[in-house]
Image (cartoon, rainbow, N blue to C red):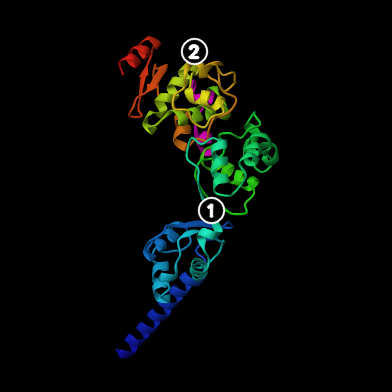
Amino acid sequence: MKKRLFTFLLITTVICCFVATYHVYVPASNSKTSTIVDIPKGSSVRSISSLLYKSGLTRNPWAFYYYVRYKKQGQLLKAGAFKIPPNLNLNKTLTLLITQNGVANLVRVVIPEGYSVNDIAHRLEKLGLTDYEEFSNYVHKSAKKDLIKDVPFLNDIPVKTLEGYLFPDTYFFEKNITKKRIVITMLREFERKILPLWAAQPKVEGSPKSRFNIHQVSTIASIIEKEARRVAEMPIISSVFYNRLKKKMLLGSDPTVVYAMGKRYKERVLYRDTRVDSPYNTYKYTGFPPSPISSFGVAAFKASLNPAKTNHYFFFAKKDGTHTFTPTYKEHLRLQRKR
């Protein structure tokens, strides 16, 4: 009996040692690219363990936690954004998180929906990653020609500027990164998040995809992004613009005027502003502006692909951020006077 128990315990111990060694020294991921892991300040070992698991760097949500406890190195872990090389095992990952300073190695860049190229350039310059004028000129004037072989979907953009195609997201860039690498990274994110939505959308008769190309649908998405304050209203705002296009009416969007004026923001667009002579001024020229006016998110693009079915042609913003929609200009004016 004792011999059987001893044999069982020995086998169990050997198996446990093998499993532990496997988890610690055999990489969990076969990825060929590095993984960015952002560890917030004050993170517990348990939350870091969960984060590594969700990033595909460990096979078990508890593996890192128990290994750190075994090594008694929890107090040595740092906060910050870390670039984890491909095929790194758990032991080497722990060593990297202890010995490297994530904050020093990578810069966290948050690009919100609705940012224009100039807004992005301002943010990048503020973070010390690039020069404002240099980045802005590159994206507007030469990036498309420079990158078209690396990013094939740029062939579908009929203008020189890449306005609207730098996808808004949170990025982690190395401090010595080039402007070209920044732009490629953001374009690839657009490729990953937006192009599959376009490809999956059926060409239903009368739908935006059946009537327009991806550049035109993206242009409307950018206007929706700037007009909407609530995601739920995006399809309705989308319907207004497509209804107007169908009737060959002016789009009449205030954010296009602000963009035409070369401004980042204007609290109120005045009548005299709508007379600015620019193809981006949708109070002056019918049809689409030459390009998107800002970077847009997934929700705005979905709304541009799938506008609500309405008879609305006008809307105005209320103080709470929502909008009032109307089918006629007469009703539009009447409700504006009442507010």
Query: Residue 276: horizontal and vertical position, in percent?
Result: 56, 19
Q: Mark 2 or mark 1, which is nearer the start of the sequence?
A: 1
Most foreground residue, 251 or 210: 251
Q: Secondary structure at mark 2?
A: loop
Q: Residue at x 58, y 56 (%)?
A: 33
- Give the residue type that dot 2 points to: Lys
Query: Residue 117: horizontal and vertical position, in percent?
Result: 57, 36
* Residue annotated with mark 1: 107
Q: Is residue 311 left or right of residue 264?
A: left
Q: Residue at x 48, y 22 (%)?
A: 253
Q: Is residue 65 left or right of residue 294?
A: left
Look at the image and give the residue range highlighted in magenta. Answer: 196-210
In this rendering, the answer to whether 159 lies above or below 143 is above
* Residue annotated with mark 2: 247
In this rendering, the answer to whether 181 lies above or below 46 is above
Instruction: Kindly tell me whether residue 202 is visible in this rendering.
Output: no
Query: Residue 233: horizontal and vertical position, in percent?
Result: 38, 28
Crowding at dot 2, Cα within 10 Å, few <14 / some 14-19 / many 20+, comes out as few
Q: Residue at x 52, y 35 (%)?
A: 295
- Give the residue type that dot 1 points to: Val
